[in-house]
Amino acid sequence: MNKTPRMKMREQDVEVRNRNFLEVALGYSYEEAIEEAKRCIDCKNPRCVMACPVRVKIPEFIKYLLEGALETAFETIYEDNILPSICGRVCPQESQCEGACILGIKQEAVNIGALERFVGDYGMEHNLADQTEVKNNGTKVAVVGSGPAGLANAASLRKKGYDVTIFEALHDFGGVLKYGIPDFRLPKDIVAHEIDNLKTMGVTFVKNAVIGKSLTIEQLMKEEGYKAVFIGSGAGLPSSLGVPGENLNGVYYANEFLTRVNLMKSRAIPTSKTPIKLGNNIAVVGGGNVAMDAARTAKRLGAENVFILYRRGREGLPARLDEIHHAEAEGIDMRLLTNPVEIIGENHIVKQVRCEKMKLGEPDSSGRRRPLGTGEFVTYDIDNIIISIGQKPNPIIKDNTANLDTQPWGGIITDEFHMTSIPGVFAGGDVVTGAATVILAMGTGKDAAHHMDEYLQNLH
Ligand code: FAD
Ligand code: SF4
């Protein structure tokens, strides 16, 4: 077995990156990518492929990379994943492809994410994405939301010849890729490049179009002539903590905070119309990617002390390992087994957060050990608190669409073909699963396109 250690990726120095929003991880050079690719032992039964939600043919693309056939390596990935530069950067590889890599049993897994990023970036630099002009078949399909689910759905349907229009509520496209995940993890020119590819393929993009408000699903189908609709409207509504003091000034929800910083450029304090001014002591509640992004963003906005409050232990943190490591290296303090029970203010302004210390009990339905209160409390002085304990779908579509079946928490219910309770209306991504991952959203968007095609063929 190959004993060469995993090739480290170069990164911006901590002291420098803490003061800018540029990408932290700098990627592999060609030589570094080749060295890392050599570690793949080309298993007969590649478990990594089965562990990738869209089944990227990993050993195959790595083999092409080793042969220097970068174009073919790109095409091999692209058959299954239209967003390789993005997934290579943000997939939780340790619980997907790399988590199943056989090398990982005795040493570190092959850095599949970094190799996919390298090949994806090569494809982007050389404009290799398939932009073949497909003849329009005249059948109109509407896609609601321009996140990874909507983009993947639109790309697949456009390739089949459908006249696809994406309706996006915001003034920019890309969903969470654009307004959630910060530039220091996912530079926005990468997202813009993917959107441009779709425009070149002939997909129409309409911005500032809130479906359920400016137009309903029913109007799209009955008045605007769309024969099928895909809802990929995500889970953008933050869950509240449900503790006293949550409405004080200085309390933010991570989604709103990140959207203002990423999309509305609130970090440009002297010039922004919606500036975000933080104090020096910031608590961030939650342990997922969103919480890490909010904490690292707060640090870059100049806050001196940023700490995470999380009710479980380190092994329960749901964020990607890289994000946890990067956050800690940047000085984010992890206050684990600590659960906020009250936000305390003075003159309506946040001053402190009171927390209960927790211990771990028996595993709960998620398989993780349940956090239990100890009856011991601790109070921290804070200037702001950013809440990041989960998101659910915005109810606007559900409330304005008759006969659309939803879960009690607001998620849209679909069958095995991704069709909702309304014939011709399909859905996928976070609006169905609840907050999940880019690749899962992309996978359902693509799969739904296949079934939408079957449905539309049968209409004729
Ligand atoms: P979204 O990306 O949410 O896109 C939905 C789009 O629909 C949005 O643009 C929204 O404006 C639009 N929309 C909503 N309602 C309407 C309407 N009524 N009409 C028209 N348009 C509408 N996943 C990972 O895999 N790795 C990560 O590192 C990671 N980090 C994350 C960090 C943050 C800060 C956040 C918030 C999420 C992160 N995720 C990560 C999760 C991942 O981004 C999501 O699972 C994924 O984006 C879901 O894709 P989607 O297309 O379903 O929805
Ligand atoms: Fe791994 Fe994500 Fe690429 Fe699949 S898409 S191979 S899970 S990095």
Image (cartoon, grey):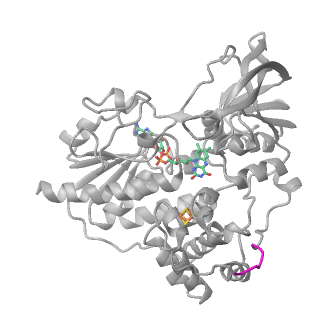
Q: Residue at x 78, y 48 (%)?
A: 327
Q: Say whether residue 392 is left or right of residue 255.
A: left
The magenta-colored residue range is: 1-6
Q: Position of residue 365 (x, y in %)?
A: 54, 36
- 48 relative to 377, above or below: below
- 369 relative to 21, above or below: above
Q: Residue at x 77, y 14 (%)?
A: 344
Q: Which quadrant would the C terminus be assigned to in this image?
A: bottom left
Q: Say whether residue 295 is left or right of residue 264.
A: right
Question: Is 2 within the magenta?
Answer: yes
Q: Which quadrant would the N terminus be assigned to in this image?
A: bottom right
Quarter of the image holding residue 187? Answer: bottom right
Q: Residue at x 66, y 47 (%)?
A: 319
Residue at the far top in the pictured view: 347
Front residue of 137/12: it is 12
Residue at the far front in the pictured view: 362
Q: Position of residue 69 (x, y in %)?
A: 55, 87
